[in-house]
Every structure is written in C-alpha cells, then in structure tokens.
Image (spheres, grey):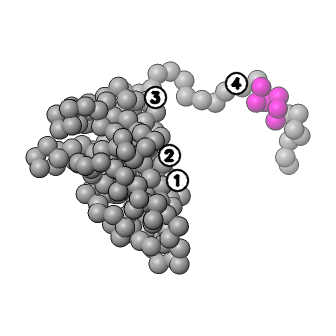
Amino acid sequence: MIPPISKLLFRALTRGPQTRRGPVAPDPDGALELAAALGERARAKLGRSLAIREVDAGSCNGCELEIHAVNGPVYDLERFGIRFVASPRHADVLMVTGPVTANMAEALRRTYEAVPSPKWVVALGDCARDGGCFAGSYAVVGGAASVVPVDLHIPGCPPEPARILSGLLEVMERAVKG
C-alpha cells in the first residue's frame, strides 16, 4: 500500500537531504593531471589557451552531460586554460557530438568553415563516429566524418571525462609534433 502523502512528506523533512556528505574523493583517474598536461600542450602549440566550440549535431545529450561534467567544478578546465567558446571564430577545436542529422549537416559544415586555421575536429562519442544506434535512419546523414574532416575520434557512449581529456591531449600532442 502506498503511504499517504503526509507520511512521505514527513519522512522527507525529518531525514534531511540524501546527498553525498564530506569532500569529493581524490582524483582516481588522473583527470587533473591530464587537464594540466593539456593546458601546457595548448600553450606550447598555440601560445595561449585552448578554445573549444562544441556542436551538437543531433545527439541524445549523453555526451553533453559528460562535457558539462568535465567543465564543471570538479575538473574546472578553465583553471588549466581550456575553455568552451560560443563563437566558432574564437575556437581551435571543433568538438562534434551525436550523429549528424540532415537538418544539422549544413550548420556543421558552416561552423567548420568559420573556425580559423589551425583547427582540429574531434568526434566525441560513438554516434559522432558512425551514427551509432541512429545509423541508417532517414534523418541521419552519418557520423561527423561524412560532413567535415575529423582529426580524432573519442570513443564511448558517452565517453567519461578522463577519456575526453586524454583525447584532447592526443590532439594537442599530434599538433605539437605536426
């Protein structure tokens, strides 16, 4: 039997919040070291901070949640000189998430053209690689590589923050060598 609403409300008010207590655990996956190395590589190659423009080409927002996590207070990429920008004209890296839908293909192409050189394109997640579980749909053109040239694919559905950071570091490593 479902308890009356007053009992549920009373229980919720007397128990208090059910959130995590205490400090956040130390960085178990080395993401802070990855972020620091990424910031150093960006300054070595570009002489300044790394600017990323993210384009959602039709995703389920799983990858965006991980991007928000990597940009949030736990990882705080801005302290390492890595920032997300609103304009492609200010970006160094174009990060594409989701399968490219027919409605977004032209917008993605124009965004790519607006990013100044040198520029790198990162396909984030399995859907951006080949369309993922949406491949073959009437509304999906394919992965990001079907519209713009892709320099690196970061696998995962969705990829966790450490994998995102290591992928961006790999892009900068290739850029420093190239």
Using the image, tell me which numbered label, if any, was put on residue 65: 2
Q: Position of residue 39 (x, y in %)?
A: 26, 33
105 vs 122, nearest the viewer: 105
Query: Which of labels 4 and 1 is toward the front?
Result: 1
The mark tally for this picture is 4
Q: Position of residue 104 (x, y in %)?
A: 49, 63
Task: Left or right? Give the position of 6 relative to 68.
Answer: right
Q: Are marks 1 and 3 in contact (CB under 8 Å)?
A: no
Whether 49 is among the magenta residues is no
Q: Which residue is mark 1?
A: 61
Q: Position of residue 9 (x, y in %)?
A: 82, 32
The crowding category of the residue bearing disc 1, from other C-alpha atoms within 10 Å (few below 14, some 14 to 19, many at least 20), is: few
The crowding category of the residue bearing disc 4, from other C-alpha atoms within 10 Å (few below 14, some 14 to 19, many at least 20), is: few
Q: Are marks 2 and 1 in contact (CB under 8 Å)?
A: yes
Whether residue 176 is situated above or below residue 111 in the rendered picture = above
> Disc 2 to disc 1, how far (Cα)?
6 Å
Residue stretch in magenta: 8-13
Magenta highlight: main SS: helix
Whether 11 is among the magenta residues is yes
Q: Which residue is mark 3?
A: 73
Using the image, tell me which numbered label, if any, was put on residue 16: 4
| Residue under the point 25% across and 49% down | 117
Earlier in the chain: of badge 3 and badge 4, it is: 4
| Residue under the point 20% across and 32% down | 47
SS class, disc 3: loop
Q: Position of residue 173 (x, y in %)?
A: 17, 44
